[in-house]
Amino acid sequence: MKVLKFGGTSVANAENIEKVIGIVKERLGEESLIVIVSALGGTTDGLLECGKLAATGDELYKEKLQEIEQRHIIAVKDLIPVQHQSALLSLVKKMCNEIEDLCNGIFLLNELSPRTIDKLLSYGELFSSQIITAAFVARGIEARWIDSQNIIKTNSDFGHAVINFELTNQNITQLLKQANDKLIIVPGFIASDSKNITTTIGRGGSDYTAAIFAAAANASSLEIWTDVSGMMTADPRWVANAKIIPSISYQEAMELSHFGAKVIYPPTIQPVLSKNIPVWIKNTFAKDEHGTVIKNDSENDGNIIRGISSINHIALLSLEGSGMVGVPGFSKRLFEALSGASVNVILITQGSSEHSICVGVDAINAERAKKVIDLAFAGEIAMQRVEPLIVEKDLSIVALVGDHMKSHPGISGKMFGALGKNGVNVRAIAQGSSERNISAVISTSDVRKAINVLHEEFFETSYKQINIFVAGAGNVGSKLLRQLNQQQKFLRDHLRLQVRVVGIANSKRAITKNEGIDLSGWEGELTNGNDSNIDQLIDEIIEKNLRNSVFVDVTASEKVAAVYERLLQKTISVVACNKIACSSSFNRYKKLKELSNEFNASFLFETNVGAGLPVIGTLSDLLRSGDNVQRIEAVLSGTLNFVFNNYDGKRLFADVVKQAQDEGYTEPDPRLDLSGKDVMRKIMILAREAGEKMEMEDITNNSFMPDECMQGSVNDFYAAMKKYEDHFKKIYDNAAKNNCKLKFVASYHNTPSGNGTAKASVGLQHISPEQDLYHLYGKDNVVLFYTDRYKEQPLVVKGAGAGAEVTASGVFADIMRAARVN
Ligand code: ADP
Ligand code: ASP
Ligand code: MG
C-alpha cells in the first residue's frame, strides 16, 4: 500500500489532473494506492472569500461563487467524455446550490462562525476528489471515492480540529479490510466531529490527511506531490538560489515546516515518523526528478545546516520585573495563562538573570495574551514587582535547522555575525537543547534580507551577492559601469562575488532593478528612467533592504553627499569619489566614520586623494601597523601638475588650463583646482586620516591666482586668465631662470607648531632637479610619507593622479573592499 497526495496546484485544472492521472497509473501495477487530493488550487481561498463577503453584506459573493462553479464545470468538461458528464455536472451543480444556500444564510445573518467556515471550505476537496475519481473511471481505471468525513474523526475545534486517532485508525483499518480496491480517492483536509459535523484540520491539512492514512494503513511510503521538486534549503519564492535537499530526517523536516517551510504541513510528520514510513516530496510537473526523501536518518551531505525557514506575523511578549528573580512558578503561571487562552507559544527565551521571560506567539493572539497575562499577574503589577506585559509586533522568526549542528561549534556565531553585518537587529534568540534549531526574532521588514544573507552564508559558499547603487553616470560613473560590466564574469569565477548594479541615477533620471541592470545597455534604460530625486532614491534603497548593499557616489554633488548618514545607519556601505563629505567640517567627517563603525558598514573614499592611487589605503596600513606620520609632502593636483608641466610661456596659460579640462582632469568647476582649494581638501583629508583634527581654515593657501580670475562664471575665469597672461608668464620665467620646475605642493607636519605656523599649507614651489618632486610628469601625483619608520627615505606613492579611467578603478577597488568586509 502506498499513499499519494496531490496538492492544489497539481490538481488546479484538467491539464494538471491529466498529469496526476499519469503518475498514479505508473504506480498502479505495483501496490494498491490511496490518493489524497486537495481542492483545485485557490478554491479554498475563494470559498473563504465568498463567506467573508457574504458576512459583511457584500453581494459580490454571488459573482465569486459563479467563478468557482464555472471553474469546476470547465474541469469536468475538459476531463470527462460528453456521454459521462451529466451525472457529474449535476453533482457539481447540486453542491454549488448548497454553497449558495450557505452563503445566503451567512449574508442574511451577517455571521460567519468557524463551524460554518469549515462546512463552506469542505466543498473544495469534495469537488476535486469526486471529479478526479470520475476522471479515473472515465479512463477505465477502477477507483473508489471515500468521503474522509466518515473516516477521519476529530474534536470540535473548527478550523484546527484535533484528530481522534483511536477512532480514525479503526475506521481506516476497517475500510481497508472491507474493501479490496486498487485505487481509493480521498478528499484531504476535511473530517467530522463526534456529531458528524464537518470539521477541517488546518490550512494545508491535506498533507496531514495523507499522513494519517499512510500511518494507519502501514503504507510502504507516502508521496507528497506538489509544484516544487522537493523540500528546499529555503523558500524558493524568496531565495533564488535555494537548493533541493535530497534527504532529510523527520526531525529536521518537522522543524523546518514548523518554522514556516510551507511545502509540508507541520503535523504531517508525526504519524509517519512513529511508523518509520519514508515520505517523498515530488514534483507533479517534473515527475522524474529525485525530490526529497524524509526518513529516520538523513544522509550527511557535508552541510551542517539543512535548511532555513521563517514565520511572519509574530508578536513578542516580554514579562519583566525584579519580582521575578529567584521566585519559582512565574513561568508556570505565564504558560498556564497562555494555554488557558489557547495561545500557542512558538518560541521561548529566558535570560539567566530570570529578570524577564520572552515568548513569541502568532500576532493574532497578542491582544488576547496581554489581557490574560496582565490579569494573571495583576497583583504583582499593582505592587510594581512585575511590569505590565510588553507586546512588540511586526516581527518574524528566522530559523536555522540541522541535525548536525550540535557537533559543530560556532554556528550561532556565524549566524549572528552575518545578520549583524547586514544591519539586521536580533530581538530574541532561542536555541533548543536538541541543538537542531537556532531561531532569531527579527523585524519583518528585514526577513527577506536575513534569509538571503543566511542562505549565502551557509549554502552558497560559492557566491556572495553584492548589490550596488551608483549615483552619477558622468565621466567617472560611465567608466566605472563599463569596468563592472567587463569584470562581472571574472569576479564570479575568481572571487565568487556576484556583482549586481541594482540602481543607477544621474541628476535627471534614475533606474532601479532588484535583479540587476544589464550593464551593456544601461544608457538607454537610464534615458527612459524615472525622474531623479536623491531623497526618494535613498528611501527606495532603504526600503529594498538588499543584503551587502553598497552606495557609490561618483558625483560632485552636495545633495548626494548629504545622504551618507542615512545609508550608513542602515548598514549600507558608502564608497565616495565625491570629496564633499570628507572635506566638510571635521565633526561631520568624524560622525561618518563613527557611523561606519557602529553600523558595520564601510565608508571608503580612496579616490578623494590621488584618484586611483593607493594613498589613503597606504596611510591606513601604516597607521594600523603602529607607524606614526611625521610629515607628508605631496603634489596632489593632477590638473595643476598637467598645467605646469605643459605651460612654457609660449602657449596661453588659459589654453593649457582649457586643455586639462577638455581632457577630463579637472573638477567639474576647474577653479576648484586652480585656486588650490581642491589640494587643500586633499591634504586635509590625509591629515584627518592621520589623526589630525583639521579644518579648511587651518590650512595656509599661498595661491598664485589673481583674485579677479576667481570671480564670476567659468567663462569669466577663462577670460580673466587671458588678461593676466603676463602674471603667469612671470611666475614661469622666475622658476625657469633658476633651472626649477613649478609644482603646487601640499605639506602637512605633525609637529606642534608652537611658533604659530600652520600644520598644513599648499602653494607653488620652485623645485630643483635634485628634489624628489622634480620628476613628476603629465598629470601625475606623488605623495611622500615621512614616518617613524620611513624617516629619511619617505614611502612614496606616485602615478597618474587624475583621469576618469583610473578614478573609476579606484572606486572599483573600494567597492571590492566594502564587499569583502560585509
Ligand atoms: P501544495 O498545494 O502542493 O500543498 P503548497 O503551496 O502548500 O503546495 O507548498 C508548496 C510551496 O511551498 C512551494 O511552491 C514553495 O513556494 C513553498 N515553499 C516554502 N518553503 C519551501 C521550502 N523550504 N521548500 C520547498 N518549497 C517551499
Ligand atoms: N485546500 C486546503 C487549503 O488550501 C488544504 C490543502 O490544500 O492542503 O488549505
Ligand atoms: Mg500544501
Image (cartoon, rainbow, N blue to C red):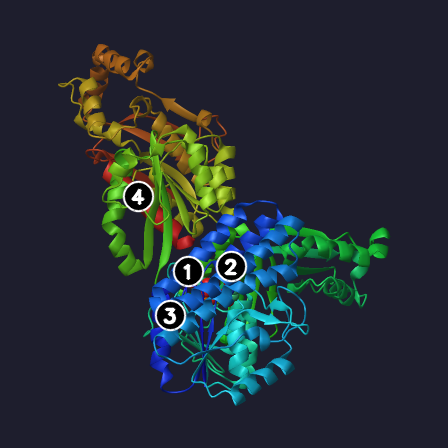
* Residue 423 in the image, given as x and y percentages of width and height: 51, 50
Question: Relative to 560, does residue 103 appear above or below in the rendering?
Answer: below
**Label at residue 84:** 3
Residue topped by disc 4? 810
SS under mark 1: helix
Q: Which residue is drawn at 46% across and 57% down?
A: 69
Give the Cα separation between the discs numbered 4 and 2: 69 Å
Q: Report the amino acid beneath label 4.
A: Gly
Q: Earlier in the sequence, mark 4 or mark 3?
A: 3
Give the Cα separation between the discs numbered 4 and 1: 66 Å
Please give left or right for residue 710 compared with residue 212 in the image.
left
Circle 4 or circle 1, nearest the eye: 1
Q: In which quarter of the image is the N terminus?
A: bottom left
* Residue 506 in the image, given as x and y percentages of width and height: 33, 33
Note whether ligand 2 is within 8 Å of mark 3: no
Q: Earlier in the sequence, mark 4 or mark 1?
A: 1
Residue topped by disc 1? 73
Q: Report the amino acid beneath label 1.
A: Ile
* Quadrant in the rendering for residue 378: bottom right
Q: Which of marks 3 and 2 is nearer the N terminus?
A: 3
